[in-house]
Structure formats: structure tokens, C-alpha cells
């Protein structure tokens, strides 16, 4: 049977360890023209504060995505039957200049959004979400935000700098890019500088769900509550892989114990079905610390799950 849209290269057409290393072995094209959704890499790690290496994240996520098959057995989603999807490669950041790089990223996402295409971003360190949100807000106005992370990433400065991977949501707030009554941070934990570290967002009207409030629970009720609060407003999903416990995702730069499980991550992403998602990212995979490849493998799967809940795929069951 001939399919209407791009399909991932199947394991019976080319061994899964062979062929070009695109995301899910999808066709590669140079830009977002004609696409409903795209995978795009941002090979950035010059915003990191501790262990680096996320510049290698997009390439490793693509490599570990080679096992992914097109049909979602849990939810019934068949995204490649409903959406035109391709891998549009990486944003050509300036790896010697972070401030220039954030402008390069915003420009690149303006181009993607101008095509009516939804970007699914392979990071890269978390700095990249700020310039993406600038492009999102230009197009959609202030967006609702679902931010899954061990950290709040709301520092005003890091080492005196306004742009770093611990500041993107503070900058997004400063620039008015967020719908502050509809910002949800999930999975925050670990040691801090003061008890107020996680309260800054709460003071702006954000909902902060610390990791301890997730332990041992299904997160389906939380996601139902979030969906009810967001409604049909444009929503951006940003997923820091360090939200997961290091048992599941050790290959990242700023590791915190006591994190979310992989099945909670799936509940969060699948719980976004029905939202008006305008973009998603998966950040902070650091291959040099990912000796088994498992962190990148989890990242690749979560990016696929994000694709499965985009508008137009249909609301999956469960
Ligand atoms: Mn982060
Ligand atoms: Mn983090």
C-alpha cells in the first residue's frame, strides 16, 4: 500500500542500523516548506553551567531513533498517516557566540512557523527554548507553557550573564512571551540556593509541581487538570531530560536524584493530547555522559510521543 505522506524507512527495506541517520529514518529536506511538522536539531551546549556535551544531542537522538516504528501501540496514533513530517536538519548556530546564537535560533524558527509547520526540537541545552519562545509569541501571542524539568530555569543571571541554560523562562517572562496563568512546571527538585528558588514562578502565577508531589503517582489527573486550565490556547511543551530520574536518564549535564519515571514522562506527553500544541522540544541529552545510549533513546521516544499528540493526529485513546 502506498502511503500519502512521508514514512519512516522501514526495517524490512533497510536494516535499522543502516542508511542515513535522520530522525526516525524520515526523509530529510532543507526547510519546512510543505510540512505539517518537522524534527529540527539545535546542537547547542555553550549555555551549559556544569557538564557540557549537549551539542552532540541531536545527532545521538537521531541515531537512537532508528528503532522507532511508525505506529503507536499504546495510543493508536498513526502520525505519519495524518501529517507531513520530515527531518529538516540542524540550526547552524554560532558555537563561539551565545548571544548571536539566540538570534540565529529565533530567525530559524520564524522561518519554520511561517510555513505553518510545528517544530519538534532535538536539543541542545535549555537556553534554546528562550529564542524559540520569542518566535512562538510573535506568531501566536503569549503561549501557555508546560515545562518538565528538575530545575526551574528562572535564574535572573548565571555568572553575571542573562543568557544561559538556567535563565530561559526568566527571560521569557521578562519579554512577555508567556501566559502566566497557564505556565506549569513539573518535576522540580534537588538542592537550591534558597527556599525561594521554586517560588519565583509561583509569585508570577505559575503552577509549580515539585517532584515529591509526583512520586508514586499516576500523573494522569495532573494532566487532566492542566488540559482543563489551558483549554484551546496555543501551548508550548518543553521537556528537559533531567526531569527524569538519573536511573533512566543519566546522560545529562545537571543531574538530580529522585526524579520522574519514564512511565510518568509518557503520561505527561500523552496527557498533552487534545491541547493546541504549537511546538515541543526535548533538551539536555549529553551523549558523552550517556554511555549506554539510553538517555538519547528515551529522548527519541519522547519526541515521537510528542509527534503523536500534535493537533491533526487525532485524540488517542487512554
Ligand atoms: Mn532545563
Ligand atoms: Mn534541568
Image (cartoon, grey):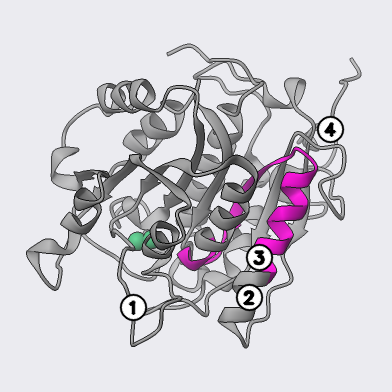
Secondary structure beneath dot 1 equals: loop
Q: Quadrant of residue 116?
A: top right
Residue of label 2: 101
Visible in this render: residue 266? Answer: yes
User: Distance of mark 3 from mark 1, alpha carbons?
Assistant: 20 Å
- Residue drawn 19% across the image and 38% down it: 214
Q: Earlier in the sequence, mark 2 or mark 4?
A: 4
Spatial distance from mark 2 to mark 1, Cα to Cα? 18 Å
- Quickly name the residue at label 4: 6
Mark 3 nearby-residue class (10 Å; few <14, some 14–19, many ≥20): many
Residue 16 seen in this snapshot: no
Secondary element at image label 3: helix
Position of 22 with respect to 174 (left or right) is right
Q: Nearer the viewer, mark 2 or mark 4?
A: 2
The answer to whether residue 90 is above or below residue 211 is below
Look at mark 3 in the image and give the residue it sits on. Answer: 105
Question: SS at mark 4?
Answer: loop
Mark 3, ligand 1, within 8 Å: the answer is: no
How many numbered marks appear? 4
The residue that mark 1 highlights is: 157
Q: CA distance from mark 3 to mark 2?
A: 6 Å
Query: What label sits on residue 27 in the rendered view?
Result: none
Task: Name the residue nearer the viewer: 151 or 140.
Answer: 140
Q: Magenta residues?
A: 104-128
Asked if labels 4 and 3 touch by Cβ distance under 8 angstroms, the answer is no
Q: Is residue 65 left or right of residue 202?
A: right
Residues at discs 3 and 2 in contact (Cβ within 8 Å): yes
Amino acid at each position: 500500500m502506498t502511503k500519502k505522506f512521508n514514512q519512516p524507512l522501514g526495517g524490512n527495506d533497510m536494516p535499522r542500523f543502516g542508511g542515513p541517520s535522520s530522525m526516525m529514518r524520515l526523509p530529510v529536506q532543507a526547510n519546512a516548506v510543505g510540512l505539517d511538522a518537522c524534527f529540527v536539531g539545535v546542537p547547542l551546549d555553550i549555555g551549559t553551567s556544569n557538564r557540557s556535551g549537549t551539542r552532540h544531542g541531536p545527532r545521538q537522538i537521531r541515531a537512537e531513533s532508528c528503532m522507532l516504528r511508525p505506529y503507536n501501540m499504546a495510543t493508536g496514533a498513526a502520525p505519519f498517516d495524518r501529517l507531513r513530517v520530515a527531518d529538516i536538519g540542524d540550526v547552524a548556530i554560532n558555537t563561539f557566540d551565545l548571544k548571536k546564537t539566540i538570534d540565529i535560533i529565533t530567525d530559524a524558527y520564524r522561518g519554520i512557523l511561517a510555513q505553518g509547520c510545528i517544530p519538534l526540537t532535538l536539543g541542545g541545552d535549555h537556553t534554546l527554548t528562550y529564542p524559540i519562545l520569542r518566535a512562538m509569541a510573535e506568531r501566536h501571542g503569549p503561549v501557555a507553557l508546560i515545562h518538565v524539568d528538575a530545575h526551574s530555569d528562572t535564574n535572573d543571571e548565571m555568572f553575571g550573564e542573562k543568557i544561559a541554560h538556567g535563565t530561559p523562562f526568566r527571560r521569557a517572562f521578562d519579554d512577555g512571551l508567556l501566559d502566566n496563568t497557564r505556565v506549569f512546571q513539573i518535576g522540580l527538585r534537588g538542592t537550591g540556593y534558597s527556599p525561594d528558588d521554586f517560588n519565583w514562578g509561583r509569585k508570577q502565577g505559575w503552577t509549580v509541581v515539585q517532584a515529591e508531589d509526583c512520586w508514586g503517582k499516576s500523573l494522569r489527573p495532573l494532566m487532566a487538570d492542566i488540559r482543563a486550565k489551558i483549554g484551546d490556547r496555543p501551548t508550548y511543551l518543553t521537556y528537559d531530560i533531567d526531569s527524569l530520574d538519573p536511573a533512566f536518564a543519566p546522560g545529562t549535564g545537571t543531574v538530580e536524584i529522585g526524579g520522574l519515571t519514564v512511565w510518568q514522562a509518557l503520561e505527561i506527553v500523552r496527557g498533552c493530547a487534545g491541547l493546541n500544541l504549537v511546538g515541543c522540544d526535548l533538551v539536555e541529552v549529553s551523549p558523552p555522559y550517556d554511555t549506554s545510549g539510553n538517555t538519547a533513546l528515551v529522548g527519541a521516544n519522547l519526541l515521537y510521543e510528542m509527534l503523536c499528540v500534535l493537533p491533526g493526529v487525532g485524540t488517542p485513546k487512554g
